[in-house]
Image (cartoon, rainbow, N blue to C red):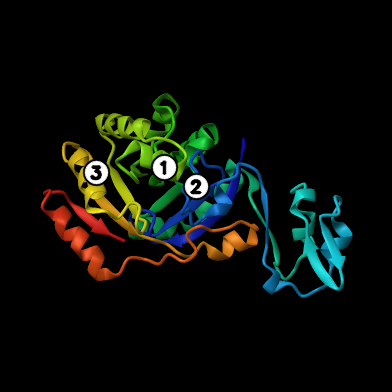
Amino acid sequence: MKGLVTDIQRFSLNDGPGIRTTVFLKGCNMRCAWCHNPETIDSRPELLFYPQNCIHCYKCVSVCPSKAHKLIGGEHRLFRDLCIRCGKCTAVCYAQALQMSGKLMSVEEIMHEVLQDRAYYIDSMGGVTFSGGEVFCQPEFLLSLMDACRKEGIHTAIETNLASPFSVMEPVLKKTSLVMCDLKLWDSEEHKRWTGIGNEQVLKNIQLLDELGIPFIVRTPLIPGITDSDENLEQIADFLQGLHNLQYYELLNFNPLGNGKYDALSRENPFAEHRPLPQQQVQVLLDALEQKHLAVKFA
């Protein structure tokens, strides 16, 4: 079985306990306006173009079967409407000005990379984390990966928006050791406005996840002017208080590092001018949440 993979990141320290390998699956069922990994959203391979890396060899022009790359006035131009996402240009672009996001990989190919760091997982009580995009956009592939890791005795974790039918997620959830899930906005209309879908299914799935007895972490990204209000965070905290298997509630500061990816995809980033919340403002939010008698962390 094969699935579409955006990236495999070794020695990850922010995607679960210990030293981990994070496998990023491609495709997402949300369209968060602030997404800092826009190359993971589309369920098809995508071409990224970094003109600052171009060495003007123009090999891409000669190999492109759809003539999406052209030399006009001595300048390399990319016409995305002609691109068929074949990746032939990236194979000859040694300067990596052209890169494909999304590679079909088999379970065996991924496990070959995962197993290289088994010793680090053991020493640090780490393991493998499956992330996205949204991992449940490829549920059968994810389940096969989970089975392969369990066979090798490797700790598994998943990062998910929990916005899929629970019947689709349950076979995977029962085989994972830790779930990290997002709850971005309490108000469903606001959630739909900024992510493309309401949050009713997310809220229901968090409760069903709790009933499975699997340890999980709920996280809210702090998006300036959208998710970072006292009201939003306190309403989420109130909802979380009655859950039995919640490890803690985590606030994630805004990540502005996606700007270059938006440019490489020829897309506008509506949050290009936003910056992470200052520590003093974050501390005020943390102090308010402590009154809820809920374990809260900040990353």
Marks 1 and 3, how far apart in space? 17 Å
Mark 2 vs mark 3, foreground winner is: 3
User: Mark 2 sits on what residue?
Assistant: 132
Measured as percent of width and height from the top left, residue 199 is found at 36, 35
Above or below, 50 relative to 102:
below
Residue most extreme to the top: 167
For the N terminus, the image quarter is top right
Query: What residue is at 68 percent from the left and 73 percent from the top?
Result: 52
Marks 2 and 3, how far apart in space? 23 Å
User: Mark 1 sits on what residue?
Assistant: 160
**Image quadrant where residue 156 sits:** top left
Query: What residue is at 40 percent from the left and 52 percent from the top?
Result: 127
289 with respect to 158 (left or right): left
For the C terminus, the image quarter is bottom left
Disc 1 crowd rating (10 Å Cα; few below 14, some 14-19, many 20+) is many
As shown in the figure, which amino acid type bears the numbered disc 1? Thr
Q: Secondary structure at mark 2?
A: loop
Query: What residue is at 38 percent from the left and 46 percent from the top?
Result: 155
Measured as percent of width and height from the top left, residue 61 is found at 85, 62
Measured as percent of width and height from the top left, residue 139 is found at 51, 33
Measured as percent of width and height from the top left, residue 69 is found at 82, 59
Pointers 1 and 2 in contact (CB under 8 A)? yes
User: Mark 3 sits on what residue?
Assistant: 236
N-terminal-most mark, 2 or 3 = 2
Disc 2 crowd rating (10 Å Cα; few below 14, some 14-19, many 20+) is many
N-terminal-most mark, 1 or 2 = 2
Marks 1 and 2, how far apart in space? 8 Å
86 with respect to 1 (left or right): right
Q: Secondary structure at mark 1?
A: strand
Which residue is nearer to you in this view: 177 or 85? Answer: 85
159 with respect to 230 (left or right): right
As shown in the figure, which amino acid type bears the numbered disc 3? Ile
